[in-house]
Amino acid sequence: MKDEEIDLKEIFLMFWKKKLEIILIIAIFAIIGYIYTMAFTSPMYTSSTTLVLAGTNSEQEGESSITTNDLTLNSKLVSTYSQLVKSNKVVRQVISNLGINISESTLRNNISVSSVSDTELIKITVKTDNPKYSADIANETAKVFTSEVAEIYNINNVHVVDVAEESSVPSNIDHKKDIIMFAAIGVVIAFAYVIIAGMLDTTVKTEEEIERLVNLPVLASIPIYDVAESKKNRRKKGGKRRR
């Protein structure tokens, strides 16, 4: 137990002696993280529109309520609709309607579709480097998709719940998160540096280390004699005597 306490004390002292180096390494990595997010990360803006599947028979039969069959059918169509949103026909129509200069594959990669678990909600999310483009593409995709569903299935059960809006804040940049992440990397590297430096340092610094290494008591110790400092002191004393 005593050896463990001594080891823990030595480890603590080893880190304490290197505290300035540790702080410096962590600070350097935090600065690198800040520079990385500011200079090397292109801002991307995300906009989303939410659709709901409901009322497949309301308009045809004049009903004002949703039947159980409607909900069952809509639940089964959620996954199908999610794939239809990114189909070639929908993507091409969106590009044509907006008159934007972008390839189909690029636009398809910029669009993501997700369904909310256990609901009839579909979220269409668009990420581009222009906030206006993101909102316009999301809204136009929802519009074209709704028309395609009505044409293919001959039903009108897709309705817009939330319209996509322009975002003024980039979705891929979080300065605090990046700085903390890089600082954490700095902590790991700083600790690794201290441990490796301690392992490579084979010098004996205290009497206790000698006793532990040779398993013999220390009978005497020779103090360090600083010749240069001694000469300075002599000169000072000599100067005072002359006065």
Image: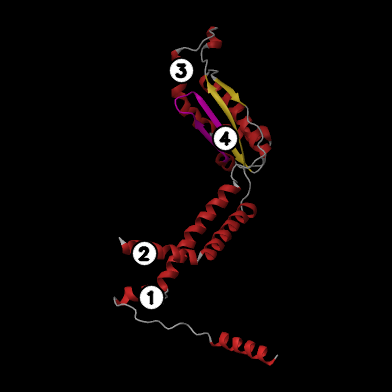
Q: Tag 3: residue type?
A: Leu
Q: Secondary structure at mark 3?
A: helix
Q: Earlier in the sequence, mark 3 or mark 2?
A: 2
Cα distance in 3D space between marks 4 and 1:
68 Å
Name the quarter where the C terminus is drawn.
Answer: bottom right
Instruction: Measuring from the top left, give residue 62's x and y in whole percent.
Output: 55, 7
| Disc 3 target residue | 71
Give the colouring mode of the picture.
Answer: secondary structure
Nearer the camera: disc 3 or disc 2: 2
Label 2 crowd bin: few (<14), some (14–19), many (20+), radius 10 Å: few
Of the residues under marks 2 and 1, which one precedes in the sequence? Answer: 2
Q: Amino acid at mark 4?
A: Thr
Q: Amino acid at mark 2?
A: Asp
- Looking at the picture, does residue 105 appear above or below residue 139? below
Identify the mark at residue 207; answer none if there is no mark. 1
Q: CA distance from mark 1 to mark 3?
A: 81 Å
CA–CA distance between discs 3 and 2?
67 Å
SS class of the residue under badge 4?
strand
Residue where numbered disc 2 is placed: 7
Q: Position of residue 13 (x, y in %)?
A: 45, 65
SS assignment at label 2: helix
- Amino acid under label 1? Glu
Marks 2 and 1 sit apart, C-alpha to C-alpha, by 15 Å
Q: Which residue is mark 4?
A: 125
Identify which residue, 211 or 199, lies in the foreground.
Answer: 211
